[in-house]
Image: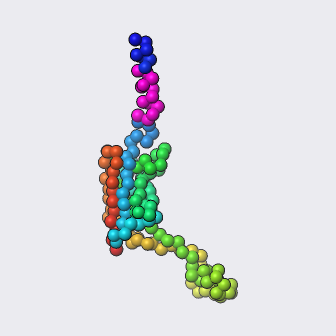
Amino acid sequence: MKKIVGFGFCVLLLVVMNGCGGPDASFRRVSGIVTYDGVPVEGAFVAFIPQDSSGIAAQGTTDASGKYTLTSATAKRSDTGAKPGKYFVKISKTEVAVDPDQAAFDRGEISYDELQVRKASKGPYVGTFSRDLIPARYANHRTSGLEATVENKRDNECDFTLEK
């Protein structure tokens, strides 16, 4: 009898240690594909903003095939997903570019003095700037028109088709 009780205790201990629950047990895997005008978007930032103020945001970045997998900011492991609930979604992709005048100077096409004249004519100078590669409305969860529901199941697929 002692052997059976001891064996049962060991099994219970193994179940608890292997994460029958664990810190990330309440998260559900969330992944999907982002396309813009029918083409997968690589390098887009995808964020799920909880509609309930007590919720937890989750985010991910798309790969070359447009696929993303979410990770919550409070999860202990990566790719854990999000907690079940309703979310607003924002998606952005920007490109950082060097000012064309700075690039011309860097290539030796204009002098330092010419660069300074061009800077002065533009007002406050910024050496780099970014531009949106998908419509800027998608970068704000209030204007994107995108929503998702994470269900209390193991895997959730949430694809987003963006248009001009």
Q: Quadrant of the C terminus?
A: bottom left
Relative vertical location of residue 86 with respect to residue 21 in this rendering, above or below: below
Secondary structure character of the magenta stretch overall: helix
State whether residue 18 is above or below residue 41.
above
Taking the image as drawn, is residue 117 in sight?
yes
Q: Nearer the viewer, residue 28 or 114?
A: 28
Number of residue marks? 0
Instruction: Residue 70: give x, y in percent of width and height.
Output: 42, 53
Q: Quadrant of the N terminus?
A: top left
114 inside magenta stretch: no
The part of the image, by quadrant, that contains residue 6 is top left
The type of colouring in the image is: rainbow
Residue drawn at point x = 59 percent, y = 76 percent: 127
Q: Residue at x 40, y 59 (%)?
A: 67
Q: Is residue 120 visible?
A: no
> Is residue 15 found inside the magenta-colored segment of the image?
yes
Residue farthest to the right, as pictured: 112
Residue 121 higher or lower than 2, as above or below: below
Q: Position of residue 148 (x, y in %)?
A: 32, 56
Q: Quadrant of residue 147?
A: bottom left
The percent position of residue 102, horizontal first and vertical second, equals 61, 80
Residue 19: where, in percent of width, then height? 44, 35
146 shown above or below 24: below
Query: Magenta segment, which residues?
Result: 8-20
Residue 59: image quadrant is bottom left
Return the residue nearer the eye: 23 or 56. 23
> In the displayed image of the protein, which residue is found farthest to the top?
1
Residue at 33% of width from left, 70% of height from top? 38
